[in-house]
Image (cartoon, rainbow, N blue to C red):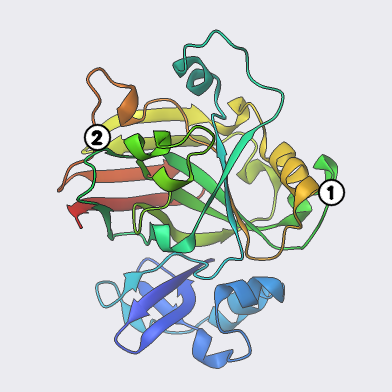
Amino acid sequence: MNFATVNTPEGQLYGAISEEGFVALSPDFPQWPSLRNVITAAALPALAQAAEGRPITHSNGSFSYAIPVPDPEKIICVGVNFPDRNAEYKDGQDAPPNMSLFPRFARSFTGHGEALLRPPETPQLDYEGEIAIIIGKAGRRISQGDAFDHIAAITLCNEGTLRDWVRHAKFNVTQGKNWDSSGAIGPWLVPFERAEQLDDIRLTTHVNGELRQDDRTSRMLFPIRRQIEYISTFTTLVPGDIIITGTPTGAGARFDPPRFLVPGDEIIVAAEGIGELRNTVRDE
């Protein structure tokens, strides 16, 4: 059973998702104001049990998706994490010994079905399809062998980027990665139960029906176990934290000429066992 945070006429709610619609569960669990609190309490199984046999409370079309964990303490993104992405830099260097990381803020993401915003300051809005993991158990200096025990759920991300703004400074990309509603996370959380859900799954991105990105998690330069180990070395990972694990080659900036997103485009990020994250684009 998958879980989502949605916006409704009654306000923001969380609950279970089915093909027919949404089952609101948050009114029954006031002690857990958001899915972050549910995850902190290790209570996704309790939500699943509560959802069994319940009728749909909101039919499809009567709600919109928010990002599944609306209030994470931190969102950490892994850059240049597939072999062909490393080759795109054309600097002749092998993969580095350690991963590139940068932060994103929750406000920079919107939900499934919503429009990414292209700001008036630049037309260079680009897409990056990725898999995101949600931390379920706190830890510091987590070993690779224990890493998957710290994951509560998985979801998808379109890690939208304003390309010229990632080059505004010498040492960072943060300002090009954090424009309001420039990316998306969702649609829902898939509870993480076994390694096969992450070890070797296909990840794709389509733009207006055209396949642009296509790779498998087994080809990551820094596998997800290593990401958790490395990141938790310098910061304590806590429940609800999000790690966005890297995008394959094929982003719009890598075409000649570049193929940036324009209003009306539709982007679909998909991964086996997770689903599809769909978004359009409009000008801010």
Amino acid type assigned to the residue bearing label 2 in the image:
Phe
Residue displayed at 80% across by 46% down: 233
Q: Residue furthest front?
A: 169
Q: Which residue was labeled with disc 2?
A: 260
Q: Which residue was labeled with disc 1?
A: 141
Residue displayed at 84% across by 44% down: 143
Packing grade of label 1 (10 A; few <14, some 14-19, many >=20) is: some
Whichever of labels 1 and 2 marks the residue nearer the N terminus, that label is 1
Is residue 159 something one can see in this rendering?
no
Which quadrant, please, contains the C terminus?
bottom left
- Where 41 sits versus 241, above or below? below
Q: Which residue occupies the foreground of this view, 207 or 16?
A: 207
Is residue 12 something one can see in this rendering?
yes
The image position of residue 220, as x and y in percent, is 60, 29
- Where 199 sits versus 92, above or below? below
Q: Residue furthest left?
A: 264
